[in-house]
Image: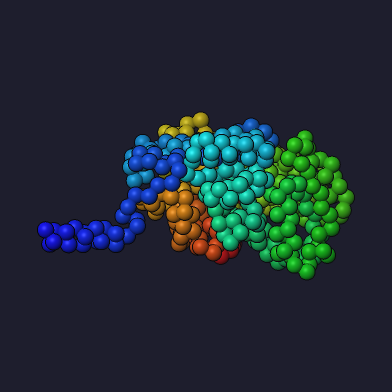
Amino acid sequence: MRARIAALVASVGLLACLPAHAQKRYGPGVTDTEIRIGQTMPYSGPLSAFGTMGRAQAAYFDSVNQAGGVNGRKIRLISLDDGYSPPRTIEQTRKLVESDQVLLLFSSFGTPTNTAALKYLNAKRVPQLFMAATGLKWGDPRRYPWTMAFLPSQKTGTEGYVQYLLRQRPKAKVAVLYQNDDFGKDYLRALRDHLGTKADGMIVAEASYESTDPTVDSQIATLKGSGADTLFSFASPKFAAQSIRRTHDIGWKPLHFVVYTSISVRAVLQPAGMEKAVGVMASTFVKDPTDPQWNNDPAIAEWRAWMREHYPDGDTAEIYNVYGYTNAQLLIHVLKQCADDLTRENVMRQAGNLRHLELPLLLPGIRVNTSATDYDPIQQLQLMRFDGAKWGRFGGVIGQ
């Protein structure tokens, strides 16, 4: 009897010494068969063009589920409309956390909207993961350990522009159009930081707009009147299109930069007028499905086939569908790394442990990197210029 008891005690002790990852550990929204996640998207409102990202992601998770899910668990995405309204974002985020009991928030859209939910989600210790938002505050795990963006920050987004400007036009007179919220203000701040001591001498005019404004025509006229020869449009797609069209129509020909979230052919360049956008500068980190260079690229071919099968209503010329697909792939990678430890704590631990990750639709040379002290997954971009028919990339990849 003593021998059997000793053997039993030894076996229990051995089980206790097994690594934690061998045991199933679940957070809210997780069972043996399901992982429930949530997001807020602007399916209505002034930035509804971005709603296709959420639809693409829902379709991607459906295709993953059809193939057996993640480690046998199906992904259930609850995607709610917030109309790009921060008060509504808070309302919908609370519903997802407190009523729907999601494991995490994934790819919620917008800088001001995610800012509104930031403190609530960190207080609740809920991952605010791979947001479709740019912001200087996101990559700060000491202050906000539960928050990580997907899109490159304004710091990354302006670095290449400033390098190019100082090299090609060191005595430029700069005008800035910016959205009057955290999205636009952070771009302006990043521009000034990169220009450093040159900022006050080079920036001759600034004009803001509200996301609910009908046009930016008056702002463009004011900026032209400053005598600037360079224009930065830190603007969402609708207003980037207006700035391109208006500068052309009033005969102003500045060196014109737009941000990488406003490079869509469908949402920006066609509404502006393709011929009016000739010479516009931008940057990117993903393969553009409208660029003939990628016509024979296996990853683009696979994505187009996937779109036809799983998101037939989606536009294969729309780069926002590339963003959504790539971000969804990134989350699946993290969930696979979590294995059977699907707690909120381990989700953030694995999201902060990505090393030189290559995703099929990222540009060559651009990789995802994170650590416990670095929550900026993508810190590289490549410059490009529009020629009236397509974007043409030039130079090497800029950034870390």
Q: Hey, which residue is sitting farthest front in the picture?
A: 1
**Quarter of the image containing the N terminus?**
bottom left
- Residue beneath the point at 57% across and 43% down: 108
Q: To which quarter of the image does residue 187 belong?
A: bottom right
Task: Tell me where residue 22 appears, x and y as whole percent.
Answer: 31, 55
Q: Hey, which residue is sitting farthest right in the picture?
A: 225
Task: Tell me where residue 66 appears, x and y as whole percent.
Answer: 36, 36
Task: Tell me where residue 345 appears, x and y as whole percent.
Answer: 47, 54
Task: Answer above or below: position of 337 versus 216.
Answer: below
- Residue beneath the point at 74% across and 55% down: 188
269 sits to left or right of 94: right
Q: Nearer the viewer, residue 182 or 356?
A: 182
- Residue beneath the point at 67% across and 40% down: 86
- Residue beneath the point at 70% across and 50% down: 182
**Quarter of the image containing the C terminus?**
bottom right
Q: Nearer the viewer, residue 20 or 325?
A: 20
Q: How many marks?
A: 0
Task: Answer above or below: position of 217 versus 13.
Answer: above
Is there any visible trace of residue 136 in the rendered image? Answer: yes
Indicate how the structure is coloured in the image.
rainbow
Q: Nearer the viewer, residue 63 or 101?
A: 101
